[in-house]
Amino acid sequence: MLKFSLDSPKGSRPKAGQLYLMKTTLGYIPAGVTSTEAFFGAAAMLHPYRALISDPSDTSWFPLVEKNELLIPPIQIAKSDFRKGGPFQRIPEKNHPNAIPFDNYFYYTLAIFWSPEEQAFVPITRENEWVPKERRIINYEIHDTNPPQGGTTDKAPEGTYFMTTVLGGYREIEYALEDALAYYGLIDTPRP
């Protein structure tokens, strides 16, 4: 089972464009910070890229940054989680590509739980069932706005990543990461 490894030897301040490795019990998942103004300036917007590496010096995943090929939708991570003893290790490589933000970030109202079928964070009903798509409210937030600016929309562009509305929620993020790694064939764990 995937868990974050909370043993980063050095902390750092998140910076837009900077790349990191998220250390987990299964290996390193590369990620990029696209904004430090998320969640009213308390969090960094993080793009987890579609790779799992065992060697921190491996740079074979850099093309994923330029294509913005994500493992799961972007997540908001409290800035304090980038401190020493957290799961994030900054990539010192001077020639690495910069994390590329989306113009808008989409999420469903009350989307907390990971749906393996949709590869998205979606809301549930009181009966613990997925809210049907036609009943979901689609929200969007404009990149790098503090306070957040955006609104609701009737339709999201094709291929949109739907984020969680929670800051933190690490157990659900760990579950989503493990499921997505299996979905993309990066690990051979059975999917739920």
Image (cartoon, rainbow, N blue to C red):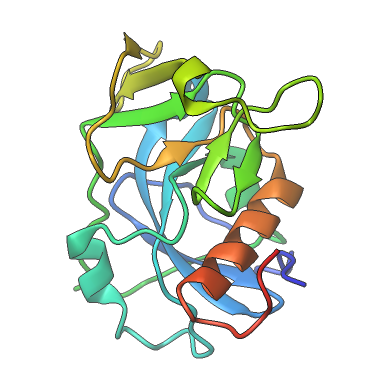
The residue at the point 34 percent across, 56 percent down is 18
Does 103 sit left or right of 41 as displayed? Answer: left
At horizontal 26% and vertical 69% (from top left) the residue drawn is 64
Number of numbered discs = 0
Q: Quadrant of the N terminus?
A: bottom right
Question: Which residue occupies the foreground of this view, 48 or 181?
Answer: 181
Residue 13 seen in the figure: yes
Q: Whole-percent x and y of residue 110?
A: 61, 21
Residue shown at 50% from the left, 81% from the top: 186
**As drawn, 97 above or below 60:** above
Above/below status of 182 relative to 104: below
Residue 158 vs 20, above or below: the answer is: above
Query: The C terminus lies in which quarter of the figure?
Result: bottom right
Foreground residue among 51 and 95: 51
Q: Is residue 187 left or right of residue 37?
A: right
Residue 83 x, y percent position in the rendering:
63, 52
> Looking at the image, which residue sits at the far right?
127
Displayed quadrant of residue 157:
top left
Quadrant for residue 88, please give it: bottom right
Residue 94 visible in image: no
Relative side of 65 to 46, left or right? left
Q: Quadrant of residue 25?
A: bottom right
Residue at 68% x, 58% y is 174
Question: Residue 137: percent from the left, percent from the top?
Answer: 46, 15
Q: Position of residue 46 (x, y in %)?
A: 44, 47
